[in-house]
Image: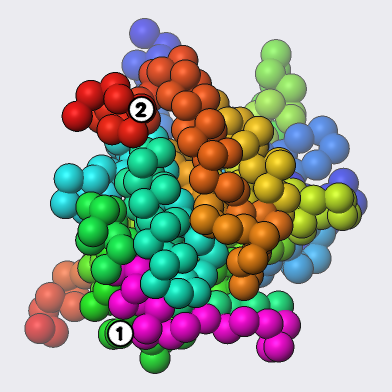
Amino acid sequence: MVVVMSERASDAQVQNVIAKLMEMGFDVHRSTGALRTVLGAVGGTRQADTALIEVLDGVQEVHRITEPYKLAGRTFKPDNTVITIGELRIGADEVIVMAGPCSAESEPQVEASAAAVKRAGAKVLRGGAFKPRSSPYSFQGLGEEGLRLLKAAADRHNLKLITEVMDISQLDLIERYADILQVGARNMQNFTLLRELGKSRMPVMLKRGISATIEEWLLSAEYILAGGNMNVMLCERGIRTFESYTRNTLDISAIPVVKQLSHLPVIVDPSHGTGRRDKVAPMARAAVAAGADGLIIEVHCDPDHALSDGAQSMFPQQFDRLMAELRIIAPAIGRSICLEPVARRGWGV
Amino acid sequence: MLDEHLVRLLNARAACALEVGRLKREQGIPIYQPAREEEVLKNVQTLNTGPLDQAAIKRLFERIIDEARHLERIADEVELNEQQKMKE
């Protein structure tokens, strides 16, 4: 770290800071300028808390040079992480699309939605069985019955299944059905849950907290990685800002930032990101253009009668159109998307 | 030629610092001795006759002292490790 002393700092104050830095295991490079002294602290072995230095007398500012996360950072692993689930590779050239209803409601609804997203080119079925809702009076999900319906539909259509785990107590049950475990935005800093997921070897998609900075998000990923589970992908799903027109503000700029800081795949959720069906496609296109490794999109066979998130769920026809657009955008930045021909359109098999 | 001379002198100084470090360790005195460092910096500025100004001499010697502290710390670590090995 670099410690900038204030102009009025006394020799004794500078000496006190040097002593403290040395106590923390740093080598100190002192540089006395005409007005102020700057101390460079290098070579520390453990994670240093800059606040310990910031509070010392005579210190004006402290700058950290290294990131507080290690395993999630590019310094630790320069190459992109590719998560392999059967034939599916997340984080490689192909942009992976996960789609499906917000929650499993009934067998026909799950089946119709799964069939629709498969036809359009999705590789993963999304769907909730345990729903964390803002209101306790809203539909809370079907529980294990929902998992069973989702898994059956995913298997029928050769899709992988991603579903949310809200609590440690659900983990064993959900692991029996899911291929990817989703940690919701509200649970991003549920460190007990994250630690437990670190012990699992199942891929985890960690959503960004509603008000989380990118650094906090990567530190949460670090909890899972530190437990030994290296199959972590990150999901940008919009953050809370002063703008109320959209449900959240989808942070497109987080994609290139995280891709630079971290080797983990980045998935984007334009459905929660905007909360409005008509804004999902433009943001999905932007996300792919910005370098997202995947998308997770809510598609419902009958959004107008959905039990949750109907307003942000796409109609299957809208999703078809979006996928066709993404097939044009992805190659423009050297990516592919849904390589195989789609049967319904008669392009092949 | 001058640089060669400088390198030799810097290393001779570093060897002294290591010896002082060893004595500090034996006596249980911390490596960082701010009063002594101030004394060194004042002393070299008194000796300075230019054309380098006092601030420049001070900056150069700050770096020399930084490296001496680093050497002493490394030596301390090595000693500590050996002591631990002996115990085991």
> A80 left or right of A116?
left
Residue A138 lies in magenta, yes or no? Answer: yes
Residue B37 image position (x, y, % from top left): 60, 52
- The answer to which of A29 and A229 lies nearer the viewer is A229
Q: Earlier in the sequence, mark 2 or mark 1?
A: 1
Mark seen at residue A345: 2
Identify whether A133 is placed above or below A56.
below
Q: Which residue is mark 1?
A: A173
> A287 left or right of A70?
right
Callout 2: SS? helix
- The answer to which of A134 and A19 lies nearer the viewer is A134
What segment is highlighted magenta in the picture? A135-151
The C terminus of chain A sits in image quarter: top left
Residue A226 image position (x, y, % from top left): 34, 67
Residue at the location (69% across, 88% down)? A136
Which chain does the residue under circle 1 lie in?
Answer: A
**What's the amino acid at mark 2?**
Arg
Circle 2 packing at 10 Å, graded few (<14), some (14-19), many (20+), is few
